[in-house]
Amino acid sequence: MWGTIIVGGCVAGAIAISGVWRSARFVRSRWQLSAGNSLLLFVTLQVLAALGAAMGSRMAPPQTEGSAPSIDGTLWMIGSAALLQMVAALLFLMRSDHVAHSWSRAKAALLGAAALAAAWFPLQAIGTVVASVQVALGGPAVPLEGHSTLQLLGTRPIDLRQWLLMGCVVLVVPAVEEVMFRGAMLGVLRRVGLSAWTAILLTAAIFALVHIPALVGGAVAPGLAMLFALGALLGWCAARTGSLAAPIMAHMLFNAVNLLQSMR
């Protein structure tokens, strides 16, 4: 615990001193959808997520009332929601060049990977500190895996259903969520005149809050703190490069590393 906090604090200090976070380094926002269309895209993706999850739960094998979510039910829910969201996002974004880039996609993706690598220990330190404070104040202990989907994927033996769900978690969900948050939501907030960092932090807060239903009891406070910090990092990646490739890559790596840790 102390090693994570010390290393994370040192890295965070180095990042602060370097000044890479300053908005003067941001490129001009290149999201081309208007504020109204960006908001429509965000709301559409949220509604389709709920609709897809409801459809998936109906198509999944029946479960005993009150039982814990099964791998089949989770796969149907996440898969159905992601499929509907991907179709809607493509219909919006293929109409014209809505995500023009100041950086090449490859260069932006590399920056996203480097940003996640640099921020990994600070992110872990934030979650560790909040978890320690929670326990010190008499709150519940934090489970080893704070996300319900990671708990399911950490079970063995691994079969085809888990491979499919892992593919959704690592590849599909990050892409859809980044279009939704660092594309549409951040685009709305910038279009209505908010400063870059105000829009980034507000988007990060919304990003964290919508994940509350997936957080396991005892992991809500640490999970919210870490997801807020992750959302700020992903927003910085988008603002720094003008490309969604950077936050998508960082988000994919974050999910992949957490998935690997859950399968120890």
Image: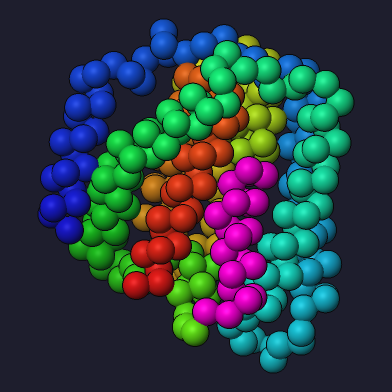
Would residue 226 be found to the left or right of residue 248 on screen? left
| Position of 45 relative to 74 (above/below) | above
Residue appearing at x 57%, y 26% in the figure: 105
Examine the rendered structure and indicate whether residue 192 appears above or below residue 138.
above
In the image, residue 161 lies in the stretch drawn in magenta: yes
Which quarter of the figure is the N terminus placed in? bottom left
Residue 245 highlighted magenta (yes or no): no
Instruction: Determine if residue 3 is in view.
Output: yes
- x and y, in percent, of residue 230 in the image: 43, 41
Does residue 176 appear to the left or right of 89 in the view shown? left
Residue pictured at 42% horizontal, 37% vertical: 113
Which residue extends farthest bottom? 64
Magenta span dominant secondary structure: helix
**Figure disc tally:** 0
Residue range in magenta is 158-177
Is residue 232 visible in the rendered image? The answer is no
In the foreground, 17 or 217: 17
Query: Colour scheme used in the picture?
Result: rainbow
